[in-house]
Structure formats: C-alpha cells, structure tokens
Image: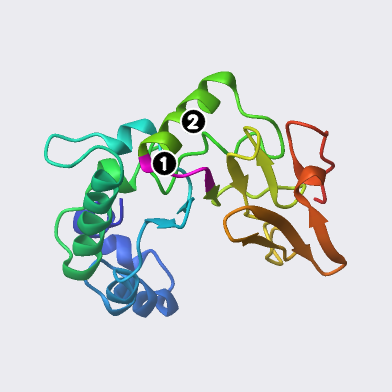
Amino acid sequence: LYEDWMAASNSNLLKTPEWTWNRISAMRAGGPVSKLLSGHSVVMKIGNTLVVHAGVLAGHLKGEDCERGMGCLEKLNNLISDYLFNGGSMPKDLMWGEDSPVWTRSYSSPDGRPLSAKNEVELEGVLKDTGTVRMIVGHTPQRSGINSAGKGKVWRVDTGMTKMVGGRPEVLEILEGREVKILTKNGPIDESERSADAVRLSNWF
C-alpha cells in the first residue's frame, strides 16, 4: 500500500524517477489531487442504476453501525472521502484486496462471458437491497466492448480505450431507466447484441 511504501524508508522514493515525485506527492492521501477526488463517490445510485468502479458485493451492504443497503454504501463513501481529503489510516478493507468495491472482478471477469451462478445470485441480492435493477461496473477491460450479463443486471463498460490497451470508445446510454443502447462511432447498438448470456461475443484485442 502507498502509505506503507512511503513509510518504510525514504529510499523508496529515491528508487523512483525524480519526475514522478510531484505526482506522488499530489496523489497521496491529503494531497491536492486526492482532495479533489474526495468529492466523488465510490458508489452512486442514479435512478434505478447502481454505478461503481469495480463492483458492490453483499458484504459491502452489511455493518454494525449502518443501515443495510444504501446506508452502508453511504458510510463507505464517507469513510473513503474522509481518508482521501484528510489522510491518516487507509480503510484497507474498502480500498484494497480482491473484494474491494474498487478492485473486485466478480461481475466482470472473464470479460465478455456470462456470470457464474454464485455471482449472479449475489448480484441479484445486492440489487434488491439497494432498490436498483442494474449495476454498471468498470475496472476490467472488456475485449468485446461494452456488454451485459446476468440478464442485463450488470453492464461491464470498461472498453480499454487507451493506446496501451487498444480498445475503442463506447458509451452506455440509459433513457428513463429503461431503454438501453450502446453508442459507437458506427452508430447505436441494441442491448441484445451485446448480451454475454445470449451471444458469444468476439474480441477486439
């Protein structure tokens, strides 16, 4: 973890190129970039859709001092916002590890493929407890572009649209919480054409 790396020894900093030092300083918890990011939620509920970087798991909705469901997600947002703005001790269970909402790949890997039965059941429970009908996740590049799984209950929207990865720009459009389309440079694509449950999707890269 970043704080552990920095606290271990100043020699760690000297092992990195000097041009990175300002970047590291700016992005540390309590630094100017982290303070800017602290104003953004880790998890958002927009209408009937749950939006998160990697995924919301059942364990994220439980806690002794939060109301099950969105209450626990609000607490999660507040804890991470406070850490990014003020620094201090990282809430490692929320920000690090394979079950973190910013690291999990439960709903997005293997990319372009259906969910496992276990993950689909967990997803359905999370949506029920948060009063939503779908989840939008990123984090794991999808070589077939934006696609859905779990009968449209999860949309994987990381298309890897960087020069390094080689993906293409695409946009997921949801109108009035019901009508879903994928916008591409060649025109819109109906959601049925990108369902990992219904068709075997081909890879771009």
Q: Amino acid at mark 2?
A: Glu
Q: Position of residue 91 (x, y in %)?
A: 22, 48
Say whether residue 171 is left or right of residue 6: right
The residue positioned 26% from the left and 75% from the top of the image is 31
Say whether residue 185 is left or right of residue 132: right
| Residue 133 is inside the magenta segment | yes
Above or below, 140 against 39 in this view is above
Q: Position of residue 102 (x, y in %)?
A: 42, 49
Residue occupied by mark 1: 56
> CA gap, disc 2 to disc 1?
11 Å
Q: Of discs 2 and 1, which sits in the foreground?
A: 2
The residue positioned 19% from the left and 57% from the top of the image is 7
For the record, the magenta segment spans 130-135
The residue positioned 40% from the left and 43% from the top of the image is 131
Residue 166 seen by the camera: no
Q: Nearer the viewer, residue 162 or 108?
A: 108
Residue occupied by mark 2: 124
Badge 1 element:
loop
Of labels 2 and 1, earlier in sequence is: 1
